[in-house]
Amino acid sequence: MESIKNIIIESLKELNEELNIKELENPDENTKIYGEGGLLDSLALVTFITDLEEKIEDELGYRITLVNERAMSRFRSPFKDVKTLSLYIQELIKEENKDG
Amino acid sequence: MVKDKVFVITGTRKGIGKSLSEYYLDKGNIVIGCSRGEGSINHKNYTHYTLDVSDEKAVVNMIRDVRKKFGRIDILLNNAGIASMNHIITTPYKTVDNIFKTNFYGTFLFTREVAKVMMKHKKGRIVNFATVATPLRLEGEAIYASSKAAIENFTEIMARELADFGITVNAVGPTPVPTDLIKNVPEEKINALLERQAIRRFGTFEDVVNVIDFFIDDKSDFITGQIVYLGGVVK
């Protein structure tokens, strides 16, 4: 869990090198990502998702696709904040393990 | 001339996909191809994946493998396609399912996954395959032409969505080229089709590659969202 959260934070920081948003300088688990009060617009979210998928594979060895039907139809977006997203990624990794 | 680029080409076992792979390999590029059957190209810079282009998991795995192995993808040619000629009344649902899966879903999946790799480098070229059967509204080609019409619209919108990432998306719309794809189409149908072109002859591989070479040229970074039909067919 901690490693997933760190990867998310690392990705946000990297992305912020281009975005220069003050609130993203030191993200924590409560940092809002996307949706109401979220710091990323849809274009930045696309880059963030791509980067995150790559990092999860390179650093943790799991090939997951963050965007799937279930994620998109959830009442509470998995991209809401850092904490929600790390829980969601944990779920995806568990499922991936089950399949594999 | 395109050289030292990493290509992903779908449907490389035969037909135009195979010829395109050999053409770009000969020019000193790296080609990663795929098809449902085993590969038929032997070249040191060619890698083959056996998969169904509409199998999401297989496509995701292939492209992530490619990213790991080559670090980048410069060009994607969404060539894989199937055709079927039939009157709408006698067209089985399964045929529609198969055609849309290979032609449209395959193009979608490869575009999505490859674009993720290209975005990182803020550069990329994607070429999709349309057909003159779409603008000509050919009878008997309703499903094939519709699946390609979907690709046209997809191309035009992808061009906009991916423009900020330096990726261009275009499509070439070939006239009939004598390959396996049209081997079951009756001769009179083909002749009637050729009659409706401004230039009434079969297309050749060279005609198709000429348009692709233009789209993927480094200098074509201001060309996107375009559908170029061969033979003088217009929308």
Image: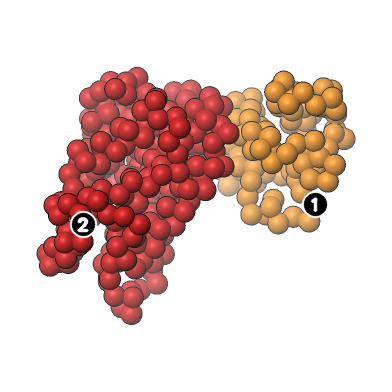
Measured from the top left, where is residue B84 in percent x and y? 28, 64
The residues tagged by marks 1 and 2 sit, at their Cα atoms, a distance apart of: 53 Å
Residue type for callout 1: Arg
Left or right of B194: which side holds B212? right
Residue that appears at 35% across and 19% down: B4
Answer whether residue B144 is visible to the viewer in this image: no
Q: Residue at horizontal 70%, vertical 23%?
A: A18
Please name the residue shown 68% across and 34% down the image: A44
Looking at the colours in the rendered structure, which chain would you say is drawn in red?
Answer: B
State the colouring used for the structure image.
Answer: by chain
| The N terminus of chain B lies in quadrant | top left
* B2 over A84 or under it: above or below: above
| Residue B74 vertical position relative to residue B163 in the rendered view, above or below | above
Q: Farthest residue in the bottom direction? A: B89
Q: Residues within 10 Å of mark 2 (few under 14, many from 20)?
A: some
Considering only vertical position in the picture, is B18 above or below B203? above
Name the residue nearer the viewer: B88 or A2: B88
Residue for badge 1: A76
Relative image position of residue B28 (x, y in whole percent): 28, 20
Residue A46 x %, y %: 64, 38
Which chain is drawn using orange?
A: A
Q: Which chain carries label 2?
A: B
Residue B137, by quadrant, is: bottom left
Q: Residues within 10 Å of mark 1 (few under 14, many from 20)?
A: few
Q: Residue at x 38, y 40 (%)?
A: B127
The amino acid at mark 2 is: Gln
> Taking B13 as reference, is A28 left or right?
right
Give whichever of B173, A23 is nearer the camera: B173
B119 to the left or right of A18: left
Q: Please name the residue that numbered disc 2 is placed on.
A: B197
Percent position of residue B126, x then y: 42, 38
